[in-house]
Amino acid sequence: MPSQHKGIVCRLWCSFIYWHLVIGYLPFRLWKRHVIETSNQLTDMPLAEVRQLIKLSESVGRHHFVKVNCLRRSMVQKSLLERMGISSHLVIGVKKTQQVFAAHCWLTYQNHIINDSQQSTSEYIALEKIDTNNANIFKAVDS
């Protein structure tokens, strides 16, 4: 493993602990800006390199002792990319199956899904695609 990756792995390891604690114990209002805001300084990194960073973070998450779900994983990856000046977008989607609502989130970079598959995300309706001024979110999920 290149020495640069060793430093990133250490940061990722700590970041998984950080986001586990933040999401698990702090009210959303205290950390919601991290979900919404994007980096001001932008680096245009090739998509393949961004995907390599995501792949590295996925490996760290699979071997971590904290509970890793889509939100924690996406927040760790989003914060890693932001520290590197790379702007990504967190997408939150919802679906309804057999009268049960479910939610899932993933990251996009330059309009490409970078930490999930097109197949799994296509099952969800992205919340940003729902016009909340004119439509009821539950009606949109039912259709």
Image: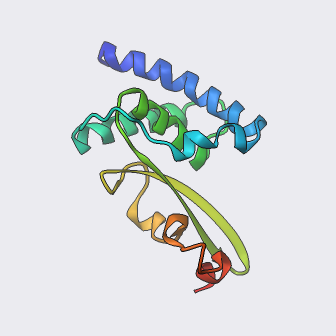
Q: Residue at x 47, y 37 (%)?
A: 77
The foreground one among 2 and 76 is 76
Left of 17 or right of it: where is 63?
left
Left of 55 or right of it: where is 70?
right
Q: Residue furthest front?
A: 133
Q: How is the image coloured?
A: rainbow
- Residue 111: x percent and y percent? 32, 57
Residue 120, compared with residue 57, is above or below; it is: below
- Residue 99: x percent and y percent? 73, 80
Quarter in which the C terminus is drawn: bottom right
Left of 88 or right of it: where is 65?
right
| Residue 118 makes an appearance in the image | yes
The foreground one among 14 and 63 is 14
| Residue 72 makes an appearance in the image | no
**Quarter of image, res 42:** top left
Q: Residue at x 43, y 54 (%)?
A: 116
Residue 5, compared with residue 140, is above or below; it is: above
- Residue 136: x percent and y percent? 65, 79
- Residue 43: x percent and y percent? 27, 34
Left of 100 or right of it: where is 3?
left
User: Disc count in the image?
Assistant: 0
**Quarter of image, res 24:** top right
The foreground one among 81 and 73 is 81
Quarter in which the N terminus is drawn: top left
Q: Residue at x 42, y 27 (%)?
A: 83
The foreground one among 47 and 61 is 47
Q: Residue furthest bottom?
A: 143
Residue 97, compared with residue 118, is above or below; it is: below
